[in-house]
Amino acid sequence: MRRDLVGHLACPVCRGPLAIHATRESAGEVEHGTLTSTCGAVFPIADFVPSFFRPDALSDADRRMLADGEYWSGFYGFYDDAGYRYFIDSRTDPAPLLFQGILRRLALGGRDNLAHLHEPHYRDFFGAGAAGSLRPASVVFEAGCGSGWLTLELARQGCRAIGQDTARGALVRAKRQAMAEGVAADYLHASSLDLPLAEQTLDAFVGFQALHHFEALERTLARVANALKPDAPVIIFEHRRSRPPKLHKLAVALERMALPLIRRRYPPTARNDWRASPAEDTATADMDQTIRDAFAIEREVSYSLFLQPLPAYAYFLTGERPGPFAVVARAVNAIDRQIARRWPDKCEHRLYLGRRRAEG
């Protein structure tokens, strides 16, 4: 971990400051050591990642979060070891049929592949959201960073990025990638219920498809709000509800028509039996109101996205031709926009843009 990280941290037990004690440093960062608090709590740093779980004081919620973290570490690690780097480096070509066991990449042009930029929610997140709100050198915190890809991308764009998750194995991989690139990204292995953040030291908060995994989301967001500076921007994209049954049936029917044809040309070569994580949809019930209560939300944009696999189907069914992909992507995005405008509250996903609430 970078030494300046400690200035943004606080003991999750007593909320007091932390001190670094390094036992090994490498490339100018702390590889192994401890963080200690005046209350006597000690937190280990291993493989450049500090951990704030205390084995002798784990709650049932901690154990559930750690189990979820083990799932995601295994998931990301499996594909990383297989040579699929997109979960860590979003500049690489994605494999949109990964969950069907097909690792064939969608090659549409280098940097433009970043985070499926043909999909409107990614464009809006990085455009109206991140690019429009974050200044170079901003200290940005991401809760539930998973594989760490977004924290890394924000660091590449000049931010001082900090990610939190319970998937320690994934965090170690992401930290190694950050160090290899020389970007300012750090990762915290920590509970979402007791985020180890110092008061009013963060310039911005981002969340991407993670908050629906959190227990007691209102507690997490209260800690985040307390750590943000006044008027700090908030950018959240979330899975907020299950897909309406009729749309789900249609999506399944389209998949069943397309996949057998695609598999004839591209037989599955990777594991495709991953099930939902243990914490999936934990916090979706009151997602909208919980976010609105925690922050001053200024804009919300809904997305249906149930047709988003269709451009990839067209790409592979036509022998990896970008033309059909582009045509279908434009049509799908137009349909999804109409669905979102007509039935915004039935849409699965939503982008929330806002700020920390003014005190008082």
Image: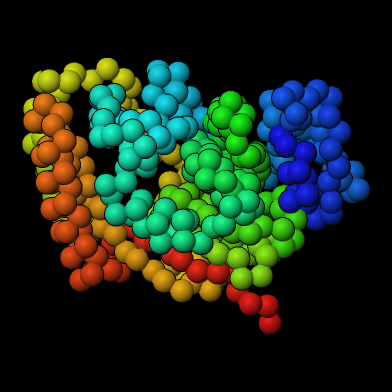
Inspect this view and state whether residue 323 appears: yes
Q: Quarter-wise, where is residue 4 in the image?
A: top right
| x 89%, y 48%: residue | 39
Q: Quadrant of the C terminus?
A: bottom right
Q: Is residue 303 left or right of residue 199?
A: left
Q: Nearer the viewer, residue 219 or 139?
A: 139
Residue nearest the observer in this picture, 137 or 292: 137
Which is more toward the observer, 5 or 343? 5
**What coloring was used for the rendering?**
rainbow
Taking 43 as reference, is 107 left or right?
A: left
The residue under the point 34% across, 53% down is: 123
Using the image, determine if residue 20 lies above or below residue 212: above
Residue 160 placement (x, y as % from top left): 63, 47
Residue 303 vs 50, above or below: the answer is below
Query: Does 174 sit left or right of 344 as displayed?
Result: right
> Is 111 placed above or below 243 here?
above
Residue 171 x %, y %: 58, 33
Q: Quadrant of the N terminus?
A: top right
Question: Image quarter for residue 185?
Answer: top right
- In-front residue for pair 214/264: 264
- Residue lying at the far bottom in this picture: please name it: 360
Choose top left, top right, bottom left or bottom right for residue 56. top right
Residue 192, image x and y in percent? 61, 50
Where does the image place residue 324, in percent across and percent down from the top left? Answer: 10, 39
Q: Residue visible at 18% across and 18% down? A: 267
Mark yes or no: residue 290 visible: no
Count the labels in the image: 0
Q: Residue at x 38, y 30 (%)?
A: 92
